[in-house]
Image (cartoon, helix red, strand yellow):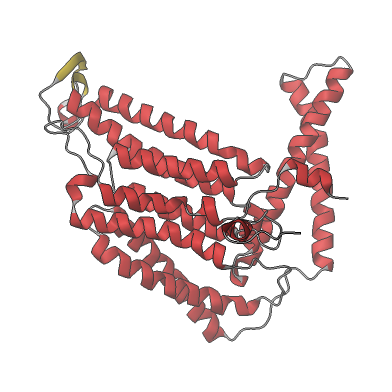
Amino acid sequence: MTRSTGPARLRPALRAPRATRANAVPAGAWWLWALGLATAASRTTNPLLLGLLVGVAGYVVAARRTDAPWARSYGAFIRLGLFVVAVRVVFSVLLGSSVPGTDTLFTLPEVPLPGWAQGIRIGGRVTGEQLVFALYEGAKLAALLICVGAANSLANPARLLKSLPGALYEAGVAVVVAMTFAPNMVADVARLRTARRLRGRPTGGIRAVLQIGLPVLEGALERSVAVAASMDARGYGRTAQVPPAVRRTTHVLTLGGLLGVCAGTYGLLAAQGAAHGLPLLLAGLVAALAGLRLGGRRSVRTRYRPDRWDVRAWLVAASGAAVAAAMIRAGAVDPDALRPGVVPLTAPVLPLWPAAAVLIGLLPAVVAPLPPSPSDSKERP
């Protein structure tokens, strides 16, 4: 009997395993990866780079999303992005633009406005430079939305909320309960509408809505009371005694850290604020995490089956951070490549090394565990 050696034996070890509850990528890692891609999209208006970012996000979603209900939201975000682009172009046509241009495409009837509305016009001349600028700006916002949609499709929202720090666990529990009850309410509505349809009663109109809504509301209240009783029996809401000085320090650190995060994020998204935004963002994160750490002393709960950040999870999060860092660096070294000119109109060029950096975002499609297939669930006893 011969035993296989060489590369044939190494292939199974390099292949990503099937995802289980123990080795699944934490929701926070998926969000960090998606936010890295979104940060990269916010630094450029080059349609080639934006299309590459959207393609990277779409490929990872297609390769690693599951059959869960939240995994079907990616298509909705794509449609929302296309709608944003269309709205941006329509607004530019109807309300004009500050971008000067000489290539006139057509002229709309212009509505005369009073003197106090100087600088605003409705209708008038529409130029090619104006439309291209609107397309570039709309595509950037659409790419941001699609990257966020990728995180929604890949990350389990319940696991993300359960992994919140101890200082925020009350809010996390409330949101998890609400997300658990929403599908039940939808199922109740469908069940009651089917029952009315079988009895020959109308399912539309105000009267039907009232007759369906009352039983649904009653069932929701009964479930709420049952969940509240079970949570009280398990000790939810119990808090430990914390000195007043610690509480005040917690509030100052958390509030100051969140303000620093907001200001640093604004600096990163601004055209010239990356140099000041990154240190401010890091300082705000450190202060906010310290405040949340101190606030967690009020919580006396234990965590059941916490998410483990293994090597694969860190690689997923680091790939998004690497794409964001490379795009920020490219904006400082060669800003013209990331923001193609519109006056005069020039064809966008794909910069090589920023495009290669964007491809780092494909790493989760290789290292993240494979989603369970339907055949796996059928084979389970």
Of 347 and 130, nearer the camera is 347
Of 156 and 192, nearer the camera is 156
Q: Which residue, as the protein is rendered here, is positioned at the far front?
A: 1
Residue 43: image location, x then y, percent: 29, 50
167 left or right of 319 in image: right
Residue plotted at (43% across, 29% down):
83
Q: Is residue 18 above or below residue 74?
A: below
192 left or right of 159 in image: right
Residue 8: image location, x then y, percent: 61, 56
Toward which corner of the image does residue 312 lie, by quadrant? bottom right
Residue plotted at (59% across, 60% down):
10
In this view of the protein, can residue 145 be seen by the observer?
no
144 left or right of 174 in image: left
Residue 270: image location, x then y, percent: 27, 53
Task: Give the quadrant of the N terminus.
Answer: bottom right
Residue 176: image location, x then y, percent: 68, 54
Q: Is residue 336 above or below residue 240?
A: above
In this view of the protein, can residue 266 be seen by the observer?
yes
Residue plotted at (40% across, 32% down):
84
Number of marks in the image? 0
Of 176 and 41, nearer the camera is 41
Q: Is residue 102 above or below residue 342?
A: above
